[in-house]
Amino acid sequence: MNNKAMLNLYPDSIGCSLQDATDFLSLPELQNCFGSVYVLPSLYHSDLDRGFCVVDYDLNEDLATTEDLEKLKALGLDLKLDIVLNHASVQSLQFQDLLKNGEKSEYRDFFIDWNAFWTGCGEMTPEGYIQPEKQYIKDMFFRKPGLPILMVRFPNGREVPYWNTFYQKVWEENGERKYLGQMDLNIRSEKVWDFYEETLQKLAAYGAKIIRLDAFAYAPKAPGRRNFMNEPETWETLARIKKLADREGLTLLPEIHASYGEGVYKKIAQQGYMTYDFFLPGLILDAIENHSGEYLAEWATELLRDNIRTVNMLGCHDGIPLLDLKGLLPDERIEGLIDTVVSRGGYVKNLHGAKNIYYQVNATYFSALGENENKLLLARAIQLFMPGKPQVWYLDLLAGTNDYEAMRLAGEGGHKEINRTNLSTQETQRRLSLPVVQKQLELLRLRNTHPAFREGAEITVCNDASNLTIAWRNGDSRIILNADMKSYQYKIVS
């Protein structure tokens, strides 16, 4: 994987389709700014969660074509795509076959039969599902209230419970049961592994070089376990996926959210993988808002000392992951950041009311910074000088602000749309002329072309009160960032 910057977007984030996005990346203003592009999974056939509920991995040709992907390759851009390991849409071929054929379906065990999973671990309820004994579920990590079950009606009228960690909706229409949802896959089934292998082959054929493993940590399950990051099963699953990916020349990027104090990022690095730097967005916010790079410098020093290779970011398609900072920042600093971003129009995402278990703050990064252009440019400069491969959310690059109308149109649970504005080609062109955008492009061009940033560089970090210095040296080439957290100014010396 090259260490140049990577643009992150939906296929229809700019214009109407990936063709418009590739035209955008072909513009003279974008030359030498990026070495990779990450296209989110709505380019596949999907029906929920803007791509992350996959029906199948064929291209949705209303949004993306093989010609578009070939054009990205011709631009010299490595392609990053997703595979969702934990679940698939109820509209998938496999689940529809289960609905049609029930016990006779060849995909009977492709999904997780709740009662088969919990046999011997609880009592059958009148509703037809096993209620596990408390000892088996007391440590389980649930993403929604109640047991993660979807009752599936077989053709003979029998109701069979299947594991459903994430979204579900069930209703009757003209006497027929209808479903929406994300059904957990049974990784104990060889059919699932055949599916993974076929999918990786398909993504490689699209030209993908990097594969993000979405919802990876939920896939391995066992009675009495947390069923999020089970060990050693998580690492065994990852090792098996890696063998399949290696055959296709694909680099894996496991996506796991966990607090700093849990040390999951270290475990991923120790297994030899790159990891997402979900700490950097909050650390940069903290450094700028508290006028001190102390914690940011400590994190950079740890990355360098322990040789932790990362993909880092400011914003992304999800919220700003401030709770990940627990154990790295004092709790009162984290709470202060959350309060600040919310006061600037952000929205808190929490897990069915359990505020201290899991939440993100949904906002554009520019709005999180108070829509201060100097702060945004300082944040981008720091990101590009930090160790790691920089990933750039298109809306951050184009100085996007909180989109409350998109939230309103999305309805209940639509808080993520605050940072997912679809921009017309005309609006994109207008924003390209903004000084804050032009200056970010200059920084990206510098990051991608200056010889000091090549692989093998020596990086040093020094913090003195409100001044942070990051220097890269590669042979005879050197470049230094001096960042002032009080004045929100920076200077680059080469």
Image (cartoon, rainbow, N blue to C red):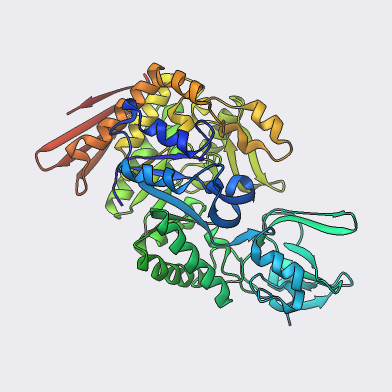
Left or right side of 336 for 19: left
Up/down of 201 relative to 443, above or below: below
Q: Residue at x 36, y 68 (%)?
A: 247
Given the current orientation, which residue lies at the most extreme bottom position?
120
Seen at 61% across and 38% down, the residue is 416
Q: Position of residue 192 (x, y in %)?
A: 56, 71
Question: Horizontal placement of 130 versus 370: left or right?
Answer: right
Residue 480 shows up from this direction: yes
Of residues 292 and 149, the one nearer the viewer is: 149
Q: Position of residue 260 (x, y in %)?
A: 47, 51
Q: Quadrant of residue 166?
A: bottom right
Along the line of sight, which residue is nearer the eye, 364 or 204? 204
Tell me if 105 is positioned left or right of 403 in this view.
Answer: right
Count every numbered label the image shows and give the total. Answer: 0
Residue at the front extreme of this rendering = 67
Tell which residue pokes out farthest to the left in this image: 476
Instruction: Please tell me whether residue 466 is drawn above or below residue 240 in the rendered image.
Output: above
Residue 393 visible in the displayed image: no
Q: Which quadrant would the C terminus be assigned to in this image?
A: top left
In the displayed structure, would residue 266 be above or below residue 69?
below
Residue 7 appears left or right of 136: left
Q: Quadrant of residue 339?
A: top right
**Which residue sits at x=43%, y=20%?**
373
* Residue 264 pos. (x, y %): 46, 58
Give residue 467's position: percent from left, percent from top.
31, 28
Q: Closer to the camera, 378 or 33?
A: 33
